[in-house]
Image: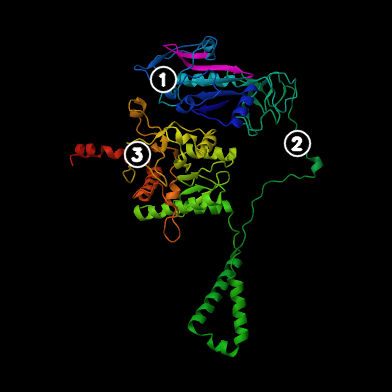
Amino acid sequence: MIVMADVGTLSPEIRDRLNAWIEQGGVLVRFAGPRLAQADDDLVPVKLRRGGRTLGGSLTWEKPQHMASFAADGPFAGLTVPKDITVSRQVLAEPDAVLATKSWASLEDGTPLVTGEHRGKGVVSLFHVGADMRWSDLPMSGTFVEMLRRVIDMSGYTSKPGPGVASDPNAETVAPLRTLDGFGAFGPPPSTAKPMSADYRDRGTADHPPGFYGSAESPIAVNTLASADRIAPLDTSGLRAKHATYTNTEPRDLRGIMLSTALALFLLDAIVVAMLGGGLAALIRRRAAPAVLALAFLLATTMAPAPTRAQNSSSDDFAIKSVSQTRLAYVVTGNADVDSIVKAGMSGLTLFLGQRTALEAGDPVGVDPARDELAFFPLIYWPIVPGAPKPPQDAINKIDAYMKQGGTVLFDTRDAVEAPPGDNGSSQTPGMQSLRELLSTLDVPELEPVPREHVLTKTFYLLRDFPGRFNTGQTWVESLPREDDEEAAQRPARGGDGVSPIIITSNDLAGAWAIRPDGQPMLPLTPGEPRQREFAFRAGVNIVMYTLTGNYKADQVHAPALIERLGQ
C-alpha cells in the first residue's frame, strides 16, 4: 500500500508506474488538500469539483458537518459511526451516476467523505479531508485507525504471484505480514521475503520465512518445521573437527615496548636541549659533516610525518564550501553570456548585502540541479533561457523536493520588456512559455501577484514593487490565506514559516545587480528611472531576508498592541 498526503501534480513517469502497480494489485490511499484540489489528476476514484465556492477544492460551511454512515458493501461496513467527529472543510466530488457506488463513507449532507474504486487487481481510495487536524478531527479518532486497518487488509492479497512462487501463475497469492527471524524474534517481514500462494502448506524457507501471511483478520500460518520433521545432531565427522572449551587469552606484557619508547623520547629531548643550549657547537666544528648527517638521520627516523590522507571527493568539497558560509546559489544554464551576467549579478547582490545588512554571505555558487545537493542554499536564482532543453526528470524531482522542504526558487524569465500590452501579455513571451513547460511536472502551489500587505514588501526595506533591469513585470508568490479563512486564523504559523517556495518575475533582477570588476554597472536599465538600480538591489535584499526570516516581520504589526498591553 502507498499513502499520498495532499500530493498534486505528478510527473508522467511516476503516474505510469503507479498505474501499473495498481493494476497488479497495489492499494493507493490519498488524502485531500489544496494541492490535490487544484491539480488535474486521474489517480483519484471520482472526479473532483472545481470553481465557485470550491476554489482550491475546499468548501467551508457555517456549521461543521458530522459523519452519517458507512456503505454496507464497502470496506468500513460494521464500524460504529462516531458522533463527535466534525468536518469543517472537504474536497467535493462531481455528482454522477456512479458516485453512490464509490462512496465508502458520507457526511450528513450526503457528500462523500471517503471514496474508492477497484482498478484491475488493485484499489484507489481518497479521503476527502486532510491527513491532519486542519480540515477535520477524524485523524485524531480511534475510528480513523480502524478505517486504515480495513484499507490495509485490502492490500494483503493479489492475483499476480510474486517472484519465487512455484505454483499456478493464476493462483491467488498472499504477502508476508509478520515473520520470525533466525533468532526466533517475531516482527515485520524482511525485504527478502516474497509473496506465496494462498494454498501454500509447506515449511518455511529463505524466500518464505515462517510467520503469518495475508490479512491481519485471517492470516495464513507458515511453520518453521513440518509435523514429521525431527531435529538431528550436527555431524562433524567429515570436518576433522575437535571439541574444545573456550579459553581466556593471556595478557600481553607491554613493559619492554613502553620502556623503549620512553628511552627514545628521552634521547630526543636531550638532543633538542643540547641544540638549543649550544652544547653541540664543538662537536659540529670538529665533525661537522658526520654530526649533521647523524642528526638528520635521527630526526628523519623519529619525526617522519605520517602519510597524508587522500583529498576529499569533489562532492565533499562542494558540501564543505557550501556550509562554511551562507551562500546564494544560481542555476547554471549552459549559456555562457547568461551565466556570466547571473554570476556577476549574484556577486553584486552579495556585496550589497554585506554593505547594508548584518549578513556577510560568501561568494555565490553555481549549481546543477541534476548533480549538486540543493539543501545547502536558502535561495536559488534560476534564469530562464527561451528554447533551452528541459532539465531531466531527476533534476525536476530534486527541485520539487527542495521547494517542499523549505527552499525557495526565484524564476526570472528576463523578458518583461518583450511582453505585449495587456494583463495576459507576460504569459505570451517565449521565456514564460519555457517556464510553463518547466513547471508542468512540478507541484506548484496557487500563485498571486505580491499583495501590498505581503511580508516580502517589508522584510528589510518598505517596497511597493520589485524592479530589475525592467520595471513593468509582475512578481508572483504563493497565495496568502483569505481573511475569512478560519483555518488560517486559528493556526499560529503557516507551513514553511510562511515562506513561498516559488517566486516568479520577468524584470531581470540579476541584470540590474550585475557589477563589473571596476565597480560599474554591467547592463543598462529600461526605462532607466532615477534610483531604479537602487530599488532593484533593495528588492533583492528583501527577497533574501524573506527566505532567511520567514514571517518574522509579519508579527511587527502587533507591536503597538503588545507594548500597550505590557504598560510600557
- Which of these two is toward me, 418 or 50? 418
Q: Earlier in the sequence, mark 3 or mark 2?
A: 2
Q: Quadrant of the C terminus?
A: top left
Q: Is residue 282 magenta?
A: no
Q: Amino acid at mark 2?
A: Leu
Q: Position of residue 27 (x, y in %)?
A: 58, 22
**Where is residue 429 shown, x and y percent of the image?**
50, 37
As drawn, the residue found furthest toward the front would be 421
Of helix, strand and loop, which one carries label 2? Answer: loop
Q: Quadrant of residue 17?
A: top right
Tell me the residue at 57%/42% (across/down): 388
Q: Is residue 249 above or below residue 185?
A: below
Amino acid carrying mark 3 in the image? Val
Q: Which residue position holds label 3?
A: 455
Packing grade of label 2 (10 A; few <14, some 14-19, many >=20) is: few
Rounded to the nearest whole Å, what is the CA distance between mark 2 and mark 1?
77 Å
Residue 109's quadrant in the figure?
Answer: top left
